Image (spheres, rainbow, N blue to C red):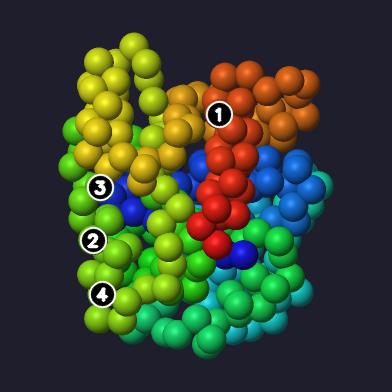
């Protein structure tokens, strides 16, 4: 199963959700691979990877999987790091998923999470057309809320070739409950988009910024704070897939 994390606006937390949701899926026994399609490499760094050789750009060029998929410190969680080839791919026309190695990756793992770059460029469109489902993280500030409508138009067919991916939901992310703008923004999102917004809210968590901090959180006992939110998100995502399949 391939799930793309997408959105037109940057800074919504796609990479963090890909890494932490991937870790919780693996912790539940689902073999999971996070593919970092963003040239910034944020998910790569969170998962302890390095951008020093072939990675997701080579994956999109349909090159061998075995040397591209890397392990992480979390059992059952692998990743494909970002690489410099993504910059070149971004300048090319979007290609069909069958011309990439993404379908083969989807057959190898229970879940593949595609951390797509913001916008509707070539790499994002490849992710969109390769995925069965889409999660769209939204930070509930003014800019994040304002970008939701355009993202939904893209996901629901604002392309020459209608994408096959279905919307699993909008994920309200990086919420600071003491910020009135965040509280109002989340309320506005839920009022405007109803069931398209997942019930789980992800609180802002400054504790996880590196691979070592992610590993430390995952090895702790009972989840607390935002980590409990990601466990809840895992459960909600799996239920939504079963319900909508």
Residue 129 can be seen, yes or no: yes
Q: Circle 2 sits on which residue?
A: 153
Q: Residues within 10 Å of mark 4 (few under 14, many from 20)?
A: few
Q: Residues within 10 Å of mark 1 (few under 14, many from 20)?
A: some
Disc 4 + disc 1, Cβ < 8 Å: no
Which tag, 2 or 4, sits closer to the chain's start?
2
Q: Which residue sits furthest top?
A: 178
Query: On the image, which quarter does residue 88 sit in?
Result: bottom left
Disc 2 + disc 4, Cβ < 8 Å: no
For mark 2, give the secondary structure: helix
In front of the other: 162 or 109: 162
Q: Circle 1 sits on which residue?
A: 229
In screen coordinates, is 1 left or right of 158? right
- The label shown at residue 159 is 4
Q: Residue at x 42, y 84 (%)?
A: 95
Q: Residue at x 29, y 64 (%)?
A: 156
- For the residues labelled 4 and 3, the Cα–Cα distance comes to 16 Å
List x then y, in percent, for residue 81: 60, 60
Query: On the image, which quarter does residue 129 sit in?
Result: bottom left
In screen coordinates, is 69 left or right of 197? right
Tally of numbered tags:
4
- For the residues labelled 1 and 2, the Cα–Cα distance comes to 28 Å
- The label shown at residue 148 is 3
Quadrant containing the N terminus in the rendered view: bottom right
Asked if residue 8 is positioned above or below residue 48 in the image, the reply reads below
Q: Residues within 10 Å of mark 3 (few under 14, many from 20)?
A: many
């Amino acid at each position: 199963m391939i799930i793309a994390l997408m959105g037109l606006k940057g800074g919504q937390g796609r990479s963090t959700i890909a890494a932490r949701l991937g870790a919780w899926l693996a912790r539940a026994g689902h073999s999971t691979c996070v593919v970092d399609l963003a040239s910034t490499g944020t998910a790569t760094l969170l998962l302890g990877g390095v951008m020093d050789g072939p990675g997701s750009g080579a994956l999109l060029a349909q090159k061998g999987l075995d040397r591209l998929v890397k392990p992480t410190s979390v059992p059952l969680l692998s990743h494909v790091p970002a690489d410099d080839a993504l910059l070149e791919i971004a300048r090319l026309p979007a290609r069909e998923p069958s011309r990439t190695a993404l379908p083969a990756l989807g057959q190898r793992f229970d879940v593949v999470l595609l951390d797509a770059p913001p916008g509707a460029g070539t790499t994002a469109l490849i992710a969109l057309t390769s995925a069965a489902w889409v999660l769209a993280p939204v930070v509930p500030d003014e800019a994040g809320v304002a970008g939701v409508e355009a993202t939904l138009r893209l996901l629901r067919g604002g392309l020459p070739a209608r994408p096959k991916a279905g919307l699993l939901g909008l994920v309200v992310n990086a919420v600071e409950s003491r910020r009135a703008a965040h509280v109002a923004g989340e309320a506005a999102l839920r009022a405007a988009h109803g069931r398209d917004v997942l019930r789980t809210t992800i609180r802002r968590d400054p504790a996880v910024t590196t691979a070592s901090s992610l590993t430390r959180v995952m090895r702790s006992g009972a989840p607390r704070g935002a980590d409990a939110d990601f466990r809840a998100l895992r459960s909600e995502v799996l239920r939504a897939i079963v319900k909508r399949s």
